[in-house]
Structures are given as C-alpha cells and as structure tokens.
Image (cartoon, rainbow, N blue to C red):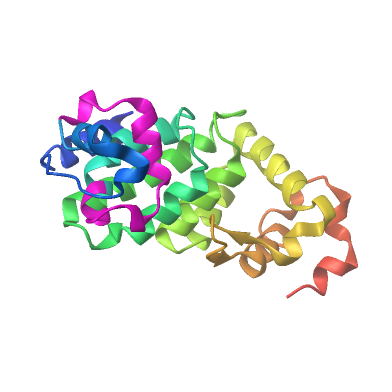
Amino acid sequence: MTALDTLDHAFASEEPFPVTGCTYCYGERGLAELSGPLHLVTDDLVASVAGEGPDHWDDFPRLYRRFVPRIIRPLVTGRLHVEPELVASRLVQAGWTTWDPPLAQALRDVWSAWWRRTLHVHPGPIPVRDVLSVVTVATDRLRPWLDTWTETGTPAADAQLADLVRDVLIEFEITDLSMGFYDEYHATTELLDWLLTDVRERVTDPRLDDPYLRRSP
C-alpha cells in the first residue's frame, strides 16, 4: 500500500489533457470523460483504457501514463477486469521506462513491493504465474524475480512455488514457455534451470525428475 500511495503521489503531476482517438469505440462522451478529472472516470472506462491498443489513441503514451494510478492499484489488488499480462504489454508499448525518473522509479518500486507481497501471501488475489509474468515483461528481466523467490523461504513462497510448478508442468508447457500477452519474453531456459537447481529441494512434484526436462533448451 505504501508503494501504491507513493505511485499516486508521483503521478499526481500528470495533468488532464484533451484526449482524442477512436470515436467509434468511445464516442465524444467517452473521450470527454477521459479528458476530465481522473477520479471521475468510471472503473469500466479505466479498464477499457488499460487494455486498449495504442492505435485507438492519438497520444497513447501520454494517456496511459496519466491513467497509471487508476490502472495499477486495481491490477495488483486483483480488481482490474483486464488480463494482467496485457497491462504489462501496454506499459511496454507506452515506453514506461523512458518516462521521467520519478514516475519510472515509482513503478519499479510497485513491482518490487508487489512481488515481495506475493511471496508472503497464499493464496493471493492473482495467480503467482500472472504476477511473475507482469513484472518480467514490464522489466524485461526474469532472473532477479526468481532470485528473490530463492531468498524467500516463507511457507507462502513455497506454496506459491508449488502452484507455479503445477501450472507450467501441465503437458510440460515449461519446455516452450513465453510470458506476456504477446509472448514477448521466452522464459523456458531461465525458469527451467532455476526450478531444476536453485529450488529443486523445495518442490515435491516428481515430474521435475523427468529426463525429458533435462534435454529441453
């Protein structure tokens, strides 16, 4: 919650602006609402912005940046009715890492806090695989999040680990696993190596001993 409050404060400097874009999908009334005070925009319209593609807006990066506080808080609390991975992909398309340093840092702090929280609570509001995918795609890095998991020896972290293993071993999906709504990040090599080495003793699933996995790329 502290990281989310800091995010709100950091993005408070993002002023309303005349939003223009696809009038077929949103109409003049919708565009006018998006151009007004952030707190008056309905949750349904926020969810629509969160998932909509860049081609629907004349200034997609600015619009997405302005709506970050309204998108991220419900995302991490499991109340945003949009695929979590899609939000990560949209943030990448909006170029979030190129935003002013205080804004980008506030988002990085949310990713870190959200991941730590995920490893300390089971079950969480969002499946651990989705959380891992969001932070991985958003930052274009998987290993740091896995390293944090390795260092977190809580019962909740182990329960989340069991959930992830059950998920990715269905039909051995782990052997060709991509993260992101558009499969932007191929995770097999890093994730499989981590499961078979760093945390193998924390997982009881015998499928991890299948020789087939050792031969996977």
User: Does residue 73 appear anywhere in the picture?
Assistant: no
Q: Position of residue 201 (x, y in %)?
A: 75, 51
Image label count = 0
Residue 88, placed above or below residue 158: below
The rendered magenta stretch, by its main secondary structure, is classed as helix
The residue most toward the front is 24
Q: Position of residue 92 (x, y in %)?
A: 37, 59
User: Position of 154 compared to 102: left or right?
Assistant: right
Residue 188, placed above or below residue 115: below
Q: Position of residue 112 (x, y in %)?
A: 40, 46
The foreground one among 131 and 70 is 70
Q: Magenta span covers which residues?
A: 37-63
User: Does residue 95 appear anywhere in the picture?
Assistant: yes
Give the quarter of the image for residue 73.
top left
Q: Residue at x 58, y 51 (%)?
A: 150
Q: Residue at x 47, y 63 (%)?
A: 141
Residue 44 included in the magenta stretch of the image: yes
Q: Position of residue 151 (x, y in %)?
A: 54, 49
Q: Residue at x 40, y 53 (%)?
A: 53
Give the quarter of the image for residue 37.
top left
The foreground one among 6 and 40 is 40
User: Position of 3 compared to 40: left or right?
Assistant: right
Quadrant where the C terminus sits is bottom right
Residue 89, placed above or below residue 121: below
Residue 39 included in the magenta stretch of the image: yes
User: Position of 32 compared to 162: left or right?
Assistant: left
Q: Residue at x 29, y 44 (%)?
A: 23
Quadrant where the N terminus sits is top left
The foreground one among 197 and 69 is 69
User: Position of 149 compared to 74: left or right?
Assistant: right
